[in-house]
Amino acid sequence: MRLTPLGEFVFGRRKTFEAAGGSPTRAAITLDEARLLATCRNADKLTELALGQFMEKLAPGRYRMTPKSLLGGCTSREDIEDRIRLFRRVVSSAPPPIWEDFFAKTLARIAPLSLEPDYIVLKVSADEEIRRLLASDPILREIVLKVEGLRIAVRRSDLKKLAKRLEQFGFLSPIPRLATEGF
């Protein structure tokens, strides 16, 4: 019985083993210079998988990068930075300028909204008189910001002032009580 080179390696008669054919070669990926498109002729499964991680498949061998495809599964800045690093490692270490700009714009768009802890939003009743009052009274206009959908935004520090001013016009409001309860 004769042992193959693999058998000799498995049984300890040989210290190294080299598989025939070497490592699989990946198909070349071309990134468009003017658009966020990638082309890959004769893409193998590994290359298709790599491109599919970051881009939408348009047709065989054609892919498009979108904000949604780049952000897929990301929940933080670190996640996005990791995906961009992975893109550089797997797809292209030096993408064209349009791709670099896209990455920079995506990173700049992280958390475009933030909570404003100094303000609270209140729903205004459908009473026509209070709506007219909120729009015309100079003191109320100074402390109230109009928000869509019959809502107003008020600084927490102005809640008592708002309640007192409304009381002067005959409106009883539970706002001061809510403010002291940690509203």
Image (spheres, rainbow, N blue to C red):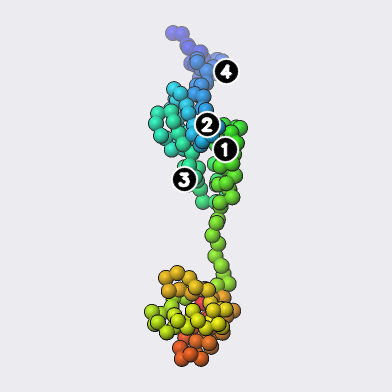
Mark 1, secondary structure of its residue: helix
Give the Cα distance between marks 3 and 4.
46 Å
Residue 52, image x and y in percent? 45, 35
Q: Where does label 3 land, which residue? A: 68
Residue 166, how many percent across, how many down?
A: 50, 87
Q: Residues within 10 Å of mark 1 (few under 14, many from 20)?
A: some
Q: Earlier in the sequence, mark 4 or mark 2?
A: 4
Judge the density around disc 3: few (<14), some (14-19), many (≥20) Cα neighbours within 10 Å.
few
Measured in 3D between alpha carbons, the distance from the residue under mark 3 to the one under mark 2, in whole angstroms, is: 19 Å
Q: How far is the residue under mark 4 from the one under mark 2?
A: 43 Å
**What SS does tag 3 mark?**
helix
Determine which residue is flagged by label 1. 98
Mark 4 or mark 1: name the one nearer the start of the chain: 4
Q: Are marks 2 and 1 in contact (CB under 8 Å)?
A: yes
Kindly report the distance in space between the C-alpha atoms of the residues bearing marks 2 and 1.
9 Å
Badge 4 crowding class, 10 Å Cα cut-off, few under 14, some 14 to 19, many 20 or more, is few
Above or below: residue 179 compared with residue 105: below
Q: Which residue is mark 4?
A: 16
